[in-house]
Image (cartoon, rainbow, N blue to C red):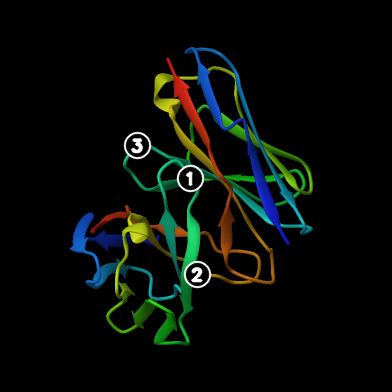
Amino acid sequence: GENVEQHPSTLSVQEGDSAVIKCTYSDSASNYFPWYKQELGKGPQLIIDIRSNVGEKKDQRIAVTLNKTAKHFSLHITETQPEDSAVYFCAASKVSGSQGNLIFGKGTKLSVKP
Amino acid sequence: SQTIHQWPATLVQPVGSPLSLECTVEGTSNPNLYWYRQAAGRGLQLLFYSVGIGQISSEVPQNLSASRPQDRQFILSSKKLLLSDSGFYLCAWRAGLVLETQYFGPGTRLLVL
């Protein structure tokens, strides 16, 4: 089955710097890759996602890149702010019709120091 | 717009007691529904998912069970809680055949003592 590895497990950056979180997946048939942000005591919130027919997607300060050949995808946050501090999860899924469950990485705790 | 509710928000239960957590979705029909557990400081573990009323798939064998009595209602149950059942329980929904994205509820914090 699918396996998703996420690195690093913790990341500390200064406000204004960039943050990069990387994930690798094992199943080359996976075709959907979302990223979630989870604040303390809350449910994960989708922040960006990418499908296998696209190599890069950007939404304001957040971007995701996908390398299907190497089977890895990354989250890039630019101009980080203290409110970006949270746990970030990547996931991979082989979606076909109504089937396709998400396999999550173990999460990255991002701390943005003011 | 669609919203997902979970209750209770927090629950403290003794070992051996029963459990019932409820999840409801508004603003959509025939969603796929999911139950996840998140242990402290760890990732999300899929427990059950459902593609329709009465249809439950189990991902991890354990003393928990799930039911879907109505289209937009998903219930997680246990007859006898174990200490290891403590964690953060998350319900999620997906728009079935249409989109791949899963949306999570606010979660239920369960502490078994």
Measure the alpha-carbon separation of dots 3 and 1. Answer: 13 Å
Label 1 packing within 10 angstroms: few (<14), some (14-19), many (20+): some
Q: Whole-percent x and y of residue A12?
A: 19, 58
Residue under disc 2 on the same chain as residue under disc 1: yes
- Which of the 4 image quadrants contains residue B70? top right
Please state the chain letter of the residue tagged with numbered disc 3 in the rendered image. Answer: B
Nearest the eye: B61 or B45: B45
Q: Which residue is mark 3?
A: B40
Q: Position of residue A59 (x, y in %)?
A: 45, 79
- For the residues labelled 3 and 2, say whether their Cβ atoms are less than 8 Å apart: no
Could you give the CA–CA distance between mark 3 and mark 2, rounded to whole angstroms?
27 Å
Q: In terms of image quadrants, where is residue A25?
A: bottom left
Number of the label disc, if any, that sits on residue A42: 1
Asked if the residues shown at circle 2 and circle 1 are in contact, with their CB atoms under 8 angstroms apart, the answer is: no
Residue type of the residue flagged with mark 1: Lys
Q: Which numbered disc, 2 or 1, marks the residue that appears first in the sequence?
A: 1
The amino acid sitting under disc 2 is Lys
Please identify, in this view, whether the residue under mark 3 or under mark 2 is nearer the observer: 3
Q: Which numbered disc, 2 or 1, marks the residue closer to the eye?
A: 1
Q: Residue at position x 50%, y 19% from top?
A: B12
Let me know if residue A32 appears in the view. no
Name the residue rendered at 59%, 17% in the picture.
B18
Q: Pointers 3 and 1 in contact (CB under 8 A)?
A: no
Residue B84 in sight: yes
Q: Position of residue B101 (x, y in %)?
A: 57, 66
Residue type, label 3? Ala
Chain letter belonging to callout 1: A
Q: Residue at the location (41% across, 20% down)?
A: B83
Left or right of B86: which side holds B33? right
Which residue is denoted by mark 2 in the rendering? A94
Question: Distance of mark 2 from mark 1, alpha carbons?
Answer: 26 Å
